[in-house]
Amino acid sequence: MKNLFALLYKNHLFLLFLLLEITALFFAIQHNAFQRSSFINSSHAIAGSTFETVDNFSGYLDLREKNALLADSLAKIKSQTLSALRLLDTNFAKINDTLYKQQYIYVSARVIHLTTHKPNNFLTIDKGSNDGIKENMAVVGVNGIVGIVNGVTPDYASVMSILHSKTELSCKLKSTRNVGFLRWNNLNYNYRTALLKDVPLTAKVVKGDTVVTTEYSNSFPGGIPVGKVLMARLADEGQSQDVTIELFLDFNILDHVFVVRDLMKEQKDSLQTKFQND
Amino acid sequence: MIEKLPRYVLIFVLLMVAQVLVFNHVYVSGFLNAYPYVLFLLILPSDTNRALLLLVAFVGGITVDIFSDSGGVHAAACVPLAYMRHFMLSTTTSLESKNDSFEPNLYYFDFRRYLTYAGVLIFVHHSIVCFMEVFEFSHIFSTLLKIVGSTIFTLTFVVLIQYIFFKKKEK
């Protein structure tokens, strides 16, 4: 026993080193492997409020561009509201609209921290579970998609950006409706481009065509514009083609985002876990 | 040692603030990142308790991790750096100084020896950070390029910071 203690004491530095290193590796691997926030991330209270303070100052620097973007999207939405439409048939009075039912609610949030140049990028936003944000909700910007919520605290949420090597999202070409998987080609760390993979050879890819989200995703509403086609090339030994697209959203001037709450998500999820589980 | 504590706490805080608010947003040629915060481990006195050094490294690494969403990558890189520091110090400094306490800064060494001391430690740190960030061995060439580039970048900042902010001690 005495010898054991002596041995332990003799090697206490190495043992301490091993202990700390294994703890750190455990944090890192957990963070990486499960693709969800471990407790070390910037939605943490201290980091969150620090970034918020800094962002309060630096947010003024490109206010002009951000306002222009917001005004654009507001104009687009205004033109779709009822007041912009003219009633053609005066014989009917609208009592209750049973044709449409609200499925998505958009919650606006501010980005208080984001990265764009790492192999795996995340954002922190200033809304959390107190505002009804939950994990796996989609996050969109005024002109494109941003990512998926991967962790929440009461006041902040962490978002896994689409600029992440593990991101996989089904998208389609708007004109031909061919579906592919959106992945970020992180080899050159370019935050303006992404790849649409597994597009069938029969699909006619036109440069400049818009790529939009599909209805198959469990988080994103369908038809949200993602980017435009830059070029296509053969992949998988000629079995399919990879389409390089330019993302509409410029992450570097991203400030306001919208978290999408799907009111029918529970129905979809319960169906899938109940009947499609094998 | 104890009367010098405020000095090192100040260095630690300032370097962390600089790393999180400035250097995390500086990219050379798009993807090279500098991590000059490792200076806080390089500069602690030579007779610092080695167990304490390991703990400080772990805490410092976790601090950077919290602010840059990297899980435990920086902690996992700082701890080996702290563990290796003793061996690097004993190989780069002269024999008679082994028992005294000195602050291993730029002015203590001659310049080439300092580059060896800091360069090797920074290289080890950056290798771990870059490989764990990518988390796979398939992009090995671009990762190696990133390690070497970032090491040079960090080393430049580590030397510059000391030239600008540290006074030469008169003997």
Image: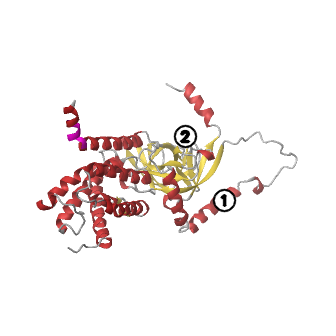
Chain letter for the residue marked with disc 2 in the picture: A
Give the CA distance from mark 2 to mark 1. Answer: 26 Å
Towards the viewer: A203 or B35: B35
Per the image, label 2 sits on a secondary structure element best described as loop
Q: Main secondary structure of the magenta part?
A: helix
Which residue appears at 29% of the width and 52% of the height? B53
Which residue appears at 21% of the width and 61% of the height? B101
Who comes first in sequence, dot 2 or dot 1?
A: 1
Q: Which residues are magenta?
A: A7-12
Towards the viewer: B153 or A13: A13
The image position of residue B132, as x and y in percent, is: 33, 47
Q: Is residue B34 visible?
A: no
- Residue A49 vertical position relative to residue A26 in the rendered view, above or below: below
Give yes or no for residue A9 being in the magenta stretch. yes
- Residue A18 vertical position relative to residue B29 in the rendered view, above or below: above
Q: Which mark is residue B70?
A: none
Residue picked out by circle 2: A217
Q: Disc 1 marks which amino acid?
A: Leu
